[in-house]
Image (spheres, helix red, strand yellow):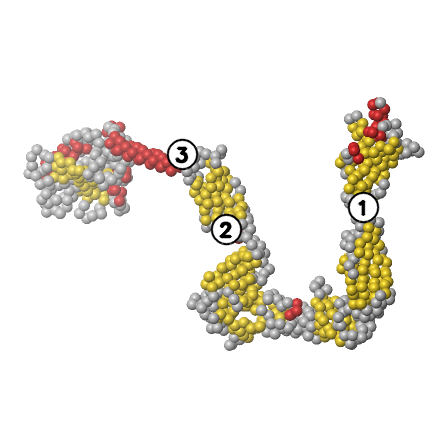
Amino acid sequence: MSITLYLAVLLIVLLPSKGCDIYPEKSVVKSGSDVRVIFRNSHMTPCPLHEINVKHIFWKLNNLKIPEEQYTITDQNSSSVIIRNFTSNVAEVTCHISAPGTEMLLGGVHIRSELPPDKPTNIYCVQLFRTSFTCYWNSGRRPGVHTDYTVYRKYNDKNDTCLSNNTFCCSCCYKDFYLTATYSIMVVAKNEFGQAWSDIVNINSFNTVKLLSPVDVLLVPLLNKTLKVSWKNSQRAGFPVVCQVRHNATDSGDWVIYNVSLDMALNGSFNIQNLVCLNTYRVAVRCIGNHGQIYWSEWSEEKTAILPEEAPSAHLDVWRKIFDSGEKEKRTVLVFWKSPTKSEANGLILGYKIRCKSAHNIVNEFTSKRQILLNLTQEAYEIEVVAYNSVGESPETKVQIPAGYFEDNKGLLQLEGLHAYSQDDHLWVKWKEPDVTVKRYIIDWCTDADCNKIEFQYSNISTVLLKGPFQPYVLYNITVHPVFEQGHGKAASIQAYQKEGVPGKIPFVNTFHVKQTEATIQWSEIPKIERHGFITNYTIFYKAENGPELSVTVNRSVFSYTLNALKPKTKYMAHIKASTKNGGTNSSEIFFTTIQFNQTLLHNLLIAAGVGVILLVLLGTVGYIMIRKHLFPEIPNPAYSSIVTLTSQGIPKVNINKTIQDGEIIAKNFKVIDQYPELEVFHMSYGGNIVFPPVPSRPHSNKGNAAFLASSDSSIDVRKVFHTEKPSVCTFRRSSSVQPLLSVSSSDLPSEPGSPIIFNPQENKSHTASEDNLFEGHFSPSLYLKNSIKTRHFNSNACSKEKEISEVKCINNLEQSILDQAYVTVDVLSIDGCGACKLKQSHL
């Protein structure tokens, strides 16, 4: 049996269920009644389940299983279900069969419930003048089935009916009627589920009279923005009539209606005034009886007309602002005005004419804009502004410019306590009323981003609602100008938002001066156009890695802040939040890492190390100089002696081969320097041998002793000076050369020109005995000549009375002193009065 049921279910799936009839007794039933749905297996076209027991059938209502106690099995081919108290507007009843582990849908039907008709209400009747009598009512709920409405009318024991099956219009028309009768009216509604009766309504037919629509409507444009409307009534009513004329512009949906009384007249007319030139107008007319009638006629057919252009009719609203131009005796005046409305312009405004009048001049300016900038002198001016179109000009508006007046003039009366606030998305300004009487206030405003478009309005009170339009989140500059009896006062200004919002993002955030335990965060100011409100504060949020978030709040004027108590060598994240009263916005995140060591300590250590290196270098340099000075002293070089300053020009050559004469000094390669008349000078090259003959005394002679000078070209100048009474003094001046001394023996010294002079007493023995006596002694050797200023003394054993002997001994001592020197320097040799020899050595 189970296999048979399974095959039957499979057939239902594969084959359509033809022959399985499912139907209700009624598809539409009265709400609240019972409904029966039947399943039947037809013999003509058997259902695939004709071999299945109908006990396996079950029912569902809107997909919910109906209890089995409501099932009825009539026979083996049919089953039914009864649904109690059916109230659903529309419901779905389905039939199913159950099989092991599954269930199958056999079919279903839709059933609706309906109610009896509602009671008709709001009954009224209209008598179309001498045409028909029609009654109307409200049927209530819309019927779902056919419903008939019958109107019962009773007049003076006469009854008549009017049948209407027009469910939605709910009207019934009588062809016969009485103009002044009183009717009793009742409406009855009926359908298959029941019927309903309305209340009886008494209607006076004269009050229900409705006139026909007016005809022949005509529009005629007149001057002064006037349009004449005329019309004709279709019928003469026989009682007073009132009509309505309505009009509107084609660009406006609002109608303007005027009442016109015609009394008993058949035709009517009306003038519509204060229209707008160049506008297209639509006009219609309707009428009503003025004798208790309650219904207007239908509107007539609409007519259109265009009003012609006229000259502007109204004064312009003009104001000005005065500024210092920066030039002497000059002012800048911004004059601005409101555009005239369409009703004031009377057409297309082509431009504006501005006339500036002073005591000495009149200037006319033209512009198509709503403002003009004038450069004026300090004189008083009267400015006139008019608007013009193709027909004419508007009346002039005058504005006074006082002499020498500026908006920021000190000493003028000024408003106090000015503030602005937003309320219900409107912008208000308020200020303290001054003690002086004020004629009026002028309030002007513009956006902070563009003050070329200025709006303004007048006021006589100190609390003013500004007549926008204003945009939210936009900053406005508002200025209030008081006008007193004695003149204009000083303006007061303020900034305000009509509505504040969340600010924009901070454009720039950065860190600098990052140290061991602190860092400075700097951010830029949000541009005004992106603030969307007044910034109240900034909040700095920062946190270390894996640490809690900390915050610091600063006021709106601060744009940098130093974070303290940070951890060394730690990575931090930070961002800035800018806030207004309506919210805040976070900036982008930045990251920084504190340093491990204190930067100031490192800086000080570097400075100390640098100073130490500098001191070490200085000490080394000083030590090197001291050691060099003591171990390697500098010895002057005769080649750089100051004797080079003596000129050698004009020095005559001396014949070195001439016979030795008494009183002469003979030397090889000597030059005689005869620059001075009483001084004999000889120049001796290093290659020659010097011979000192006896120098006899010359009594009464003013000449001094002989002097030997070494020149820069490695030669020696010898000067012989004779004294009368004092012993002769041999003077040698030392070279100023700074060439270092050489520790060499006299035998190693060169003998070519430019080398130091070497005196050899063994040579030139062919000279006279006086010469030999002069050089018979030897100089005592000296390791080097000291490079210092001092005097060396050579004292004889006893003072000799003979001057020649003293001189010879002095020379001998000199010879012994300079023998074997590495360099020859010029010493000063003198013999004092007692025969003592003195050798003076000095730097030149």
Up-down: is 761 above or below 399? Answer: above
Identify the residue under disc 2: 535
Identify the residue under disc 3: 597
Q: Nearer the viewer, residue 813 or 311?
A: 311
Q: Going 58% across and 54% down the picture, which residue do you hit? A: 472
Q: Disc 2 residue type?
A: Ile
Q: Going 25% across and 36% down the picture, which residue do you hit? A: 636
Q: Is residue 577 visible?
A: yes
Q: Which of 599 and 525 is in front in this view?
A: 525
Q: Can residue 304 be seen in this view?
A: no
Mark 2 Cα-neighbour bin, 10 Å: few <14, some 14–19, many ≥20: many
SS of the residue under disc 3: loop
Report the label total. 3
Up-down: is 374 above or below 793? Answer: below
SS of the residue under disc 1: strand
Q: Where is residue 425 in the image (x, y as percent from the top left)?
A: 57, 56
Q: Position of residue 538 (x, y in %)?
A: 48, 47
Q: Quadrant of the N terminus?
A: top right
Q: Disc 1 residue type?
A: Lys
Question: Residue 168 sits in which quadrant?
Answer: bottom right
Distance CA(mark 2)–CA(mark 3): 38 Å
Q: Nearer the viewer, residue 801 or 494?
A: 494
Identify the residue under disc 1: 30
Distance CA(mark 1)–CA(mark 2): 70 Å
Q: Check whether the beta carbons of the residues at disc 2 and disc 3 lie within 8 A of each other.
A: no
Q: Going 54% across and 46% down the picture, which residue do you hit? A: 585
